[in-house]
Image (cartoon, rainbow, N blue to C red):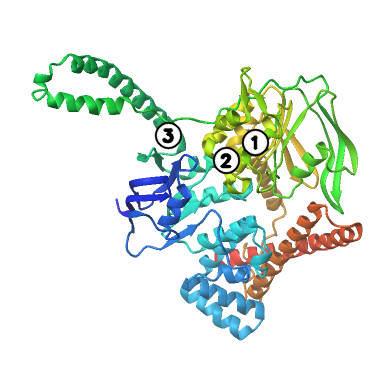
């Protein structure tokens, strides 16, 4: 096999904190490799060193000569002064430059310039590149290419950086948490895209389905030792358990042998020490190995007994909520039971958080009711995260809630002990919140919610920034949780593990109550789509144009130069309308507009929907002519 990346004896420290030391591994051509390590082991730092963003203390990183490398960092830095178009076409790629010139010509309407750039597109076979680029931008919902980078949210910037690196089609792709800020549909598309591409991949992600379906090789860094696994994430989990069991058995065996050797060495006459030196040397090696401890410590969540739930938990009746003419919730009714564990899924901005805020009384519905029973004690983990002051100390945040925490087994822990229970070492207890990483903030916030022992738990995107170890334990906790649970998440693995039924936001205010987990829902949805496709195919066959009686063939219309110009113009117009529609929907879902502005936006979105229907219908007609002409 051809080696694309060789990492040799790499070390990196920050003061006394050793991230990794003398690690060595390689990535082969066409491998889809995931890097797995405990929180704080320096995964992102390692990727930054490999991607030439940081320097190592020692060691070498060597790529195969002549290959191109693309790198998506966890928090990409883009030029705020550029437009999205300028960012996308800023790559030093000849095809990208040709497509950029063609796009500019189409925008100008100059027929001479269009003809010249079309000829360049033809001669360089850039049409496939342009088509792939448009697919990537469309799937990541990047429509307004003239928007300034500086006006975008962090999530939008991450998606643009992801599109940027994918469009380059590098030989070697490095991705750090690529699914952050992607909803389920985007994640599923990216998963398939990476699975099908021949690009060699090195990736860090906490999305376990993504790992399972994309990667065929796992590199684990544990206690500064590299372990390689040829297989996906499920295979890695099995083999890692085997490795830890074998290591534990070997240590037990060494301890048994050590007791015998200890007895021998204590009885051995000193005068015979030289003759048995080899056995003495082996004794000390054995002692060192027997003293090893398998570090498999994890967060253990076992809070006290939740408040007792009565017969009435939460009653939602005919709930409606709109912003202008845009319906988010339309006549939703549901009666919660004591042990319901419900997952909520749907596109970004479809109204999931709106529903939670109505349930918690933070937002008034247009009509309908949402009423808790008298015995309900809710806990709400919000998507926005922790909202304490940046200079407030970690231990004070816990003490403000309780000086003593009672666990499920009856143990009482002080605030300091409780922090250690959640893997916050003593040196971090008096650190200000500003010093915590994203994952540590999320874990601290989770502590503040769970330690209140709610009997109705509402979690809005709890998996963001949590490492795999913490996610596994949170899933175990929620599976054993005796109260009622609502969880919003884009993490498909997490939803499958904790949700027994779903509220699916399907658009136009419709919320589908689905009795099953997320995988079952996907299977059902695909079956429904297949049935729709078959029905549409039947309707199309019945409505097919009659053949010309003289030759028995359909009349064929050529895809002329003029039709091609109309086709290209329609693509641009549709993209602009989609971008404007997405912008208006985001403003409406924010709930910060006054009534006059809401009315204006609602009127405009209706105009856009009407225009989109008309233009998309014409685009489909032209697409059929184009395909027919190509055949």
Q: Is residue 237 left or right of residue 388?
A: left
Q: Which residue is at 41% across, 49% downward?
A: 13
Q: Nearer the viewer, mark 2 or mark 1?
A: 1
Judge whether residue 524 can be spotted in this image: no
Q: Is residue 4 above or below residue 564?
A: above
N-terminal-most mark, 3 or 1 = 3
Judge whether residue 306 can be spotted in this image: yes
The furthest residue to the bottom: 112
- Disc 3: which residue: 235
Mark 3 crowdedness (10 Å alpha carbons): few <14, some 14-19, many ≥20: some
- Disc 2: which residue: 466
- Disc 1: which residue: 446
Secondary structure of the residue carrying numbered label 3: helix
Query: On the image, which quarter does residue 223 sit in?
Result: top left
Mark 2 crowdedness (10 Å alpha carbons): few <14, some 14-19, many ≥20: some
Q: Nearer the viewer, mark 3 or mark 2?
A: 2
N-terminal-most mark, 3 or 2 = 3
- Residue 558 picture location, percent across and down: 62, 72
Q: Is residue 89 left or right of residue 240?
A: right
Secondary structure of the residue carrying numbered label 2: loop
- Residue 438 picture location, percent across and down: 59, 46
């Amino acid at each position: 096999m051809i080696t694309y990346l060789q990492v040799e004896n790499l070390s990196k420290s920050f003061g006394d904190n050793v991230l990794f030391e003398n690690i060595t591994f390689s990535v082969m051509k066409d491998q889809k490799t995931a890097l797995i390590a405990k929180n704080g082991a320096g995964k992102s730092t390692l990727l930054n060193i490999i991607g030439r963003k940081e320097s190592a203390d020692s060691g070498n990183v060597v790529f195969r000569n002549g290959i191109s490398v693309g790198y998506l960092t966890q928090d990409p830095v883009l030029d705020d002064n550029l437009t999205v178009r300028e960012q996308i076409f800023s790559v030093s790629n000849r095809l990208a430059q040709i497509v950029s010139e063609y796009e500019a010509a189409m925008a100008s309407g100059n027929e001479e310039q269009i003809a010249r750039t079309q000829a360049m597109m033809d001669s360089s076979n850039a049409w496939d590149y342009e088509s792939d680029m448009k697919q990537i931008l469309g799937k990541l919902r990047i429509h307004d290419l003239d928007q300034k980078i500086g006006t975008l949210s962090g999530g939008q910037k991450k998606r643009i950086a992801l599109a940027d690196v994918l469009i380059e089609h590098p030989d070697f792709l490095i991705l750090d948490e690529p699914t952050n800020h992607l909803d389920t549909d985007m994640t599923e598309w990216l998963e398939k895209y990476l699975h099908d591409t021949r690009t060699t991949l090195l990736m860090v992600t906490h999305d376990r389905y993504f790992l399972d379906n994309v990667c065929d090789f796992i590199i684990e860094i544990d206690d500064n030792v590299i372990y390689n696994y040829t297989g996906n994430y499920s295979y890695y989990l099995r083999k890692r358990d085997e490795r830890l069991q074998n290591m534990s058995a070997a240590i037990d065996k060494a301890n048994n042998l050590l007791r015998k050797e200890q007895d021998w060495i204590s009885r051995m006459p000193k005068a015979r020490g030289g003759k048995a030196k080899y056995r003495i040397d082996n004794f000390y090696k054995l002692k060192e190995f027997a003293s090893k401890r398998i570090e498999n410590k994890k967060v253990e969540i076992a809070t006290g007994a939740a408040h007792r739930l009565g017969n009435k938990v939460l009653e939602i009746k005919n709930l409606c909520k709109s912003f202008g003419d845009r319906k988010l919730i339309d006549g939703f009714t549901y009666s919660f039971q004591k042990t319901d564990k419900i997952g909520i899924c749907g596109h970004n901005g479809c109204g999931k958080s709106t529903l939670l805020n109505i349930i918690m009384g933070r937002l008034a519905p247009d009509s309908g009711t949402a009423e808790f029973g008298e015995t309900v004690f809710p806990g709400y983990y919000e998507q926005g995260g922790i909202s304490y002051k940046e200079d407030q100390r970690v231990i004070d945040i816990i003490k403000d809630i309780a000086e003593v925490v009672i666990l499920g087994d009856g143990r009482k822990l002080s605030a300091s002990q409780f922090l250690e229970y959640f893997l916050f070492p003593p040196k971090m207890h008096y650190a200000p919140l500003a010093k915590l990483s994203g994952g540590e903030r999320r874990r601290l916030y989770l502590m503040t919610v769970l330690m209140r022992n709610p009997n109705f738990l509402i979690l809005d995107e709890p998996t963001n920034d949590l490492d795999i170890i913490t996610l596994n334990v949170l899933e175990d906790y929620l599976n054993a949780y005796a109260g009622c649970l609502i969880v919003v998440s884009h993490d498909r693995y997490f939803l499958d593990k904790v949700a027994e039924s779903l509220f699916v936001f399907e658009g136009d205010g419709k919320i589908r109550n689905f009795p099953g987990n997320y995988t079952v829902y996907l299977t059902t949805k695909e079956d429904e789509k297949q049935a729709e496709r078959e029905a549409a195919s039947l309707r199309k066959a019945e409505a097919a144009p009659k053949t010309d009686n003289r030759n028995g063939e359909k009349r064929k219309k050529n895809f002329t130069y003029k039709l091609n110009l109309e086709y290209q113009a329609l693509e641009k117009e549709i993209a602009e309308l989609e971008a404007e529609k997405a912008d208006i929907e985001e403003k409406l879902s924010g709930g910060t507009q006054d009534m006059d502005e809401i009315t204006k936006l609602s009127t405009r979105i209706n105009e856009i929907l009407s225009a989109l229907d008309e233009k998309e219908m014409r685009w489909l007609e032209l697409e059929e002519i184009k395909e027919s002409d190509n055949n």
